[in-house]
Amino acid sequence: MTEAGAGVVRVALVDDQQLVRAGFRMVIDSQPDLEVVLEAGDGAEAVRALEPAFGRPQPDVVLMDVRMPTMDGLEATARIVERGTAEHPAPKVVVLTTFDLDEYVLSAIRAGASGFLLKDAPPEEMLAAIRTVHHGDAVIAPSSTRRLLEHLVQVLPPDEPDAPPSPARTAVAELTDREREVLVLMARGRSNTEIGQDLFVAEATVKTHVGRILAKLGARDRVQAVVVAYETGLVRPGS
């Protein structure tokens, strides 16, 4: 393993299929700004390998499969994310999925994953997902993510009419009109730059709104905020 140079995004591949990892590695390592620094065949191996005490350079982004032996990607994601600190933040986790894993993907997002990637996505979409997640801006920009979110929301359990308002609905109700506008545009896959253009405001202003939205919703990142937007009905599939 070569140590990633300055400015290079370090990537970890976690999948129980060696051929899948080999294919991903070939595509990622062909890019001058990306490098695969770690591979693991199941979640338990990934958790051990990503232990900060090992002293090795930590990956910036993890591509995490869901169905694996020993420990699945959901538990591994939760364990990796929960031990991040302000001084040593956890790597961003992108879940590898297919449309038939609905309940797993929502669980992964709640566990701390920063996005999803369809396993049959074209190489350029995978590379774009790694870069956008690493930069922490438009982590929902890959076109597959919005389609997947809209598919997932169809299998969410319906609200009980007599049930008290959920914490998520209460939090959304506390957003200002402008913050709701920004959240809707985030759910449509718009980047901060695009949102600024849509609303005729500076990108710095958009970043301020996004920060306040995340704080009010208690969301870890943009993806979790978008899931809340769908779950509470602020954004509906196909809108």
Image (cartoon, rainbow, N blue to C red):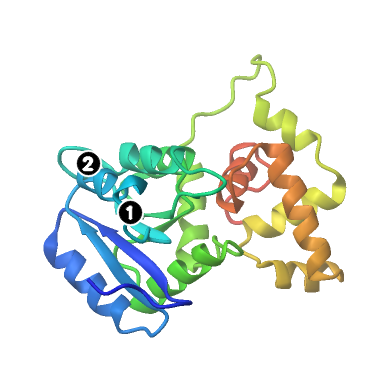
- Quote the CA–CA distance across marks 2 and 1: 18 Å
Quarter holding the C terminus is bottom right
Q: Quadrant of residue 135?
A: bottom right
Report x, y in % for residue 132: 52, 68
User: How many residues crowd around disc 2 within 10 Å: few (fewer than 14), some, or many (20 or more)?
Assistant: many
Q: Is residue 10 above or below residue 224?
A: below
- 50 horizontally vs 33: left or right: left
- 231 horizontally vs 53: left or right: right
Residue at point 26%, 74% (across, down): 2
Residue at point 25%, 71% (across, down): 24
Mark 1 falls on what kind of element? loop
Q: Is residue 66 above or below residue 57?
A: above
In the image, 32 versus 231, the foreground residue is 32
Q: Amino acid at mark 2?
A: Ala
Residue that mark 1 sits on: 55
Q: Amino acid at mark 1?
A: Gly
Q: For residue 44, which numbered disc appears in the image? A: 2
Report x, y in % for residue 211: 73, 51
In the image, 83 versus 163, the foreground residue is 83
Report x, y in % for residue 84: 47, 43
Nearest-to-viewer mark from 2 and 1: 1
Q: Is residue 44 above or below residue 197?
A: above
Q: For residue 30, which numbered disc appears in the image? A: none
Report x, y in % for residue 161: 64, 19
Q: Is residue 192 visible?
A: yes
State which tag comes first along the sequence, 2 or 1.
2
Q: Is residue 97 visible?
A: no
- 237 horizontally vs 165: left or right: left
Which residue, as the protein is rendered here, is positioned at the far left?
18
User: How many residues crowd around disc 1 within 10 Å: few (fewer than 14), some, or many (20 or more)?
Assistant: few
Quarter holding the N terminus is bottom left
Mark 2 falls on what kind of element? helix
